[in-house]
Image (tube, helix red, strand yellow):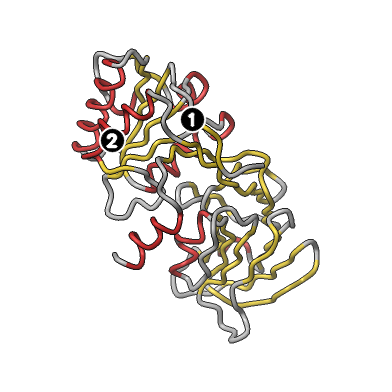
Amino acid sequence: MTDFEPGEPPEVVGISGRTDQPEAVRTATEACRLFEERGVKVLVDKTLGIQGYENASLGDIGESSDLVVSIGGDGTILRISRMISEHEIPILGVNLGKFGFLTEVEADDLEEAVDRVCEGDYDVEIRKKLAVTVGGVPEGDVLNEVTVITNKPAKMIRYRLYVDDVEIEDVWADGILVATPTGSTAYSLSAGGPVVEPRVPASIITPLNPFKLSARPLVVSMDRTVTVKVDNPERAEVVLDGQEYVAMENPVEVTESNNVAKFVRFGTSFFDKFRAKFLEW
């Protein structure tokens, strides 16, 4: 599978974003106007409350749109990605947050971005995701990471880590996370994990404050199954992309998803963005 595919002019565009920021609603309204002026049908996330355009749920937007505009920050993109996961349509991230590593443009550049999208002058970047099962129940995919963590601050949990049924570690810690290369620049990075280029098909396993000097981050092939089992699972919880909380049940199993995430890109490389967002921030 290639990392990029050519973009195409959309016929229908979905618009979503943060509902708790007036600036996001204003930017979403402007995006609606710009696309409509260029002859593109617009579907608006009904939670934004924008009148004068067809409103729909994010699920319906994912089913009916050729592209989705996400207005906010990385958290907004993660939420939208989870809601439209099965449809695999490109997301254009418009940054209103402080960091916005997954976003592609700032709000001031919205009109130029709309012009390029409508002309098909963009690439679609393909990012791999991880599928998560908790206690035998599929809990969907994550774009960044799945975290198994104590639900009692300052109280460690004991977990056992397996890769393809081979026990790797038995550790007391605050928790453990399994990240995609996309997620390697998020929570995993702050916990001491490595930065991994998005095109590398790997899972990054990072312990959280382990009470063991030898417990260090581990990078494995994404097609392997990573399993986490916790003593006293009632003392832990599972967090999916920082968005959804699931009661811990053994085992938590993580492996490469059959689904992918797609993003609108205008030529900025991962390394350009990494330098701008991390090394010069």
Q: Secondary structure at mark 2?
A: loop
Q: Residue at x 51, y 41 (%)?
A: 125
Label disc, if present, on residue 7 of the rendered structure: 1
Q: Are marks 2 and 1 in contact (CB under 8 Å)?
A: no
Q: Residue at x 70, y 60 (%)?
A: 221
Who is closer to the viewer here, 104 or 169?
A: 104
Quarter of the image with the N terminus is top right
Question: How far apart are the two marked residues, 2 and 1, measured between alpha carbons?
Answer: 28 Å
Question: Is 52 rendered above or below residue 3?
Answer: above
Q: Residue at x 47, y 71 (%)?
A: 191
Whole-percent x, y for residue 90 in the image: 48, 33
Whole-percent x, y for residue 258 in the image: 68, 40
Label disc, if present, on residue 157 of the rendered structure: none
**Dot 2 or dot 1, earlier in sequence:** 1
Question: Is 9 rendered above or below residue 175?
Answer: above
| Residue identifier under label 2 | 19
Q: Is residue 161 left or right of residue 93?
A: right
Question: Is 57 rendered above or below residue 178?
Answer: above
Label 1 neighbour load within 10 Å: few <14, some 14-19, many 20+:
many
Whole-percent x, y for residue 267 in the image: 42, 44
Label 2 neighbour load within 10 Å: few <14, some 14-19, many 20+:
some
Quarter of the image with the C terminus is bottom left
Q: Quadrant of residue 118?
A: top left
Q: Residue at x 62, y 62 (%)?
A: 233
Name the amino acid, label 2: Thr
Q: Secondary structure at mark 1?
A: loop
